[in-house]
Image (cartoon, helix red, strand yellow):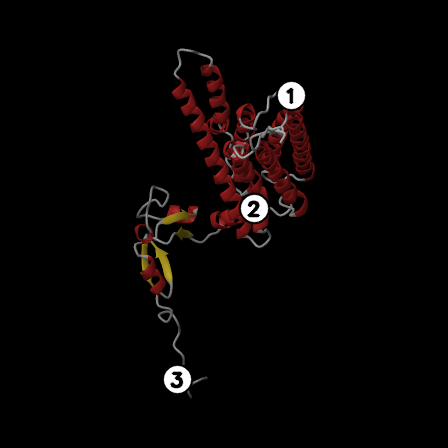
């Protein structure tokens, strides 16, 4: 019987690791994401120009500056990625550092917008200017010290952590002020504040999480890159074009409350839940002989000589020569004539 030998065929299959993409696929992905970034930047700049052209309400100028600076920065970054001047591997690295600049540098303008928009008119003094320019000063210091071999790397890294925490504090504070002010008054809605605050919130959430999301795949990192800018253009566009955030601003409510308290002839004292004086008007400050309500933390009893429960129990409270006394409503009321003795 003839010995039959069957050929042994060995098949080798080349398997690429999960998440590994071919060069042409990566180039196409980067081009699409950067092109979308350019369109997003154009939308933010259009929203900024519309707000500046149509409105002159308090805070509009600062909003225009903030959104314009963000739009220009994000647009330049996206163009740099598109033309290849900024290398892209997984949307961390150089892109992540530039994204940090885009959202951190304008935060001072965002804080000033939130203050002006909610009726808190902070004057632009030297101290305020330094606080606004603090992130820029830190970035300049990092750039200068990073090239010096004699400077340790740990202090330079600590500066970066400090400026990120500082920027995040300004962003969150501005968001809280805007949302609280818009939901407080009847002529505004909380959605106005949510739309305005949604831009910085989505920027920070998306871009700060890119180093973790990009570990899944380059597509996930690129999606986070786009979502940060998309949140800004959608939030700002919705606030300006749909919700009329600058036509019906909460500024008039805050300023009106302050003017009513300050200009009334009555003695006005506002206290919190623990009877601590929060605010007084000029009339009560000039009439108070016990303690200056504006000097430190004082209570209602320190100013009026009686606690809140005692004042609530009184039928009428009058202020006379620095003392508080209870005046019965029936004490000065004329006696009624007896039945049958009416003339």
Label 3: state its secondary structure: loop
Instruction: Determine which residue is flagged by label 3.
Output: 338
Tell me which numbered mark, 1 or 3, is placed earlier along the sequence: 1
Can you name the residue that lies furthest to the front here?
A: 1
Q: Identify the disc placed on residue 59.
A: none
Tell me which numbered mark, 2 or 3, is placed earlier along the sequence: 2
Mark 1 or 3: in front is 1
Label 1: state its secondary structure: loop
Seen from the viewer's position, the closer of residues 291 and 148 is 148
Instruction: Determine which residue is flagged by label 1.
Output: 84
Report which quarter residue 46 is drawn in: top right
Task: Please report the residue visible at 47 percent of the width from the left and 13 percent of the height from the top.
Answer: 147
Report which quarter residue 145 is drawn in: top left
Seen from the viewer's position, the closer of residues 299 and 53 is 53
Q: Residues within 10 Å of mark 3 (few under 14, many from 20)?
A: few
Instruction: Determine which residue is flagged by label 2.
Output: 194
Report which quarter residue 233 is drawn in: top right
């Amino acid at each position: 019987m003839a010995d039959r030998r069957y050929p042994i065929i060995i098949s080798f299959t080349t398997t690429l690791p999960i998440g590994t993409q071919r060069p042409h696929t990566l180039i196409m992905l980067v081009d699409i994401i950067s092109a979308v970034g350019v369109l997003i930047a154009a939308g933010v700049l259009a929203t900024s120009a519309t707000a500046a052209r149509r409105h002159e309400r308090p805070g509009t100028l600062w909003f225009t500056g903030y959104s314009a600076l963000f739009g220009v920065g994000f647009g330049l970054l996206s163009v740099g990625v598109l033309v290849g001047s900024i290398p892209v591997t997984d949307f961390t690295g150089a892109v992540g550092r530039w994204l940090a600049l885009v959202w951190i540098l304008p935060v001072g303008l965002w804080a000033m917008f939130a203050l002006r928009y909610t009726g808190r008119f902070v004057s632009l003094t030297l101290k305020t200017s330094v606080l606004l320019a603090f992130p820029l000063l830190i970035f300049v210091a990092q750039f200068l010290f990073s090239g010096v071999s004699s400077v340790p790397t740990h202090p330079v890294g600590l500066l970066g952590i400090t400026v990120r925490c500082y920027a995040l504090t300004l962003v969150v504070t501005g968001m809280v002020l805007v949302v609280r002010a818009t939901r407080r008054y009847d002529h505004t809605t909380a959605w106005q504040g949510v739309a305005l605050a949604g831009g910085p919130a989505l920027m920070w959430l998306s871009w700060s999480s890119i180093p973790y999301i990009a570990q899944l795949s380059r597509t996930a990192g690129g999606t986070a890159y786009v979502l940060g800018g998309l949140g800004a253009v959608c939030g700002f566009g919705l606030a300006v074009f749909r919700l009329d955030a600058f036509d019906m601003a909460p500024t008039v409510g805050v300023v009106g409350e302050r003017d009513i308290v300050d200009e009334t002839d009555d003695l006005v004292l506002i206290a919190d839940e623990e009877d601590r004086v929060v605010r007084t008007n000029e009339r009560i400050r000039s009439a108070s002989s016990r303690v200056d309500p504006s000097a430190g933390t004082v209570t209602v009893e320190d100013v009026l000589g009686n606690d809140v429960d005692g004042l609530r129990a009184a039928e009428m409270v009058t202020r006379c020569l620095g003392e508080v006394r209870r005046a019965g409503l029936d004490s000065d009321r004329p006696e009624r004539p007896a039945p049958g003795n009416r003339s």
